[in-house]
Amino acid sequence: MRRVTAALAYAGAALAEIAGCFAVWAWTRNGASAWWLLPGMASLGLFAWLLTLAEADAAGRAFAAYGGVYIAASLLWLWAVEGRAPTPWDLVGAALCLLGAGVILVAGRPR
């Protein structure tokens, strides 16, 4: 699997995880119907499956690299879905996390 494919797997996993977690948030914090939990659970299952598609020699390395993508995607969700713009510090933090994810994916592999 090429890194481009891994990047797509991480992006899809982030969207699925955030959507699933948001469904629980909407139910518990925003008073949404418990029916929100059904697509939320399906979305979390999709998240777990997509994460297995990322090229890595170990699950922990795939999960660690994914963490940076998740942070950046969460800030995009904050802006696009919740209508709250990330602060400059949010953006700097996300950039550092993506840099770290890149180091883990590219340089962290045993040869």
Image (cartoon, rainbow, N blue to C red):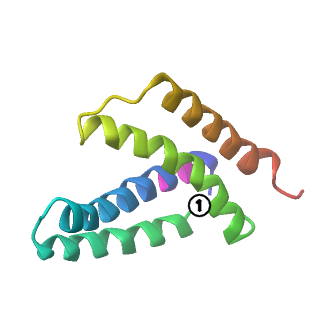
Q: Nearer the viewer, residue 33 or 19?
A: 33
> What kind of secondary structure does the magenta stretch mostly adopt?
helix
Q: Nearer the viewer, residue 25 or 41?
A: 25
Residue reaching furthest right?
A: 111
The residue identified by callout 1 is: 54
Q: Residue at x 67, y 36 (%)?
A: 99
Q: Residue at x 44, y 59 (%)?
A: 13
Q: Position of residue 102 (x, y in %)?
A: 69, 42
Q: Residue at x 12, y 65 (%)?
A: 32
Residue 42 image-quadrant placement: bottom left
Q: Residue at x 51, y 46 (%)?
A: 71
Q: Find out whether residue 7 is within the magenta segment.
A: yes
107 shown above or below 47? above
35 shown above or below 93? below
Q: Residues within 10 Å of mark 1 (few under 14, many from 20)?
A: many
Q: How many marks?
A: 1
Q: Find out whether residue 62 is within the magenta segment.
A: no
SS type, badge 1: loop
Q: Is residue 61 left or right of residue 108?
A: left
Q: Is residue 27 left or right of residue 109?
A: left
Q: Is residue 1 left or right of residue 49?
A: right
Give the magenta part as a residue range. Answer: 5-9
Q: Position of residue 34 (x, y in %)?
A: 14, 76
Residue reaching furthest left?
A: 33
12 shown above or below 75? below
Quadrant (top left, top right, bottom left, bottom right) of the C terminus: bottom right
Q: Nearer the viewer, residue 57 or 16?
A: 16
Q: Is residue 5 left or right of residue 62?
A: left
Quadrant (top left, top right, bottom left, bottom right) of the N terminus: bottom right
Q: Position of residue 24 (x, y in %)?
A: 27, 68
Tell me which amino acid carries mark 1.
Answer: Ala
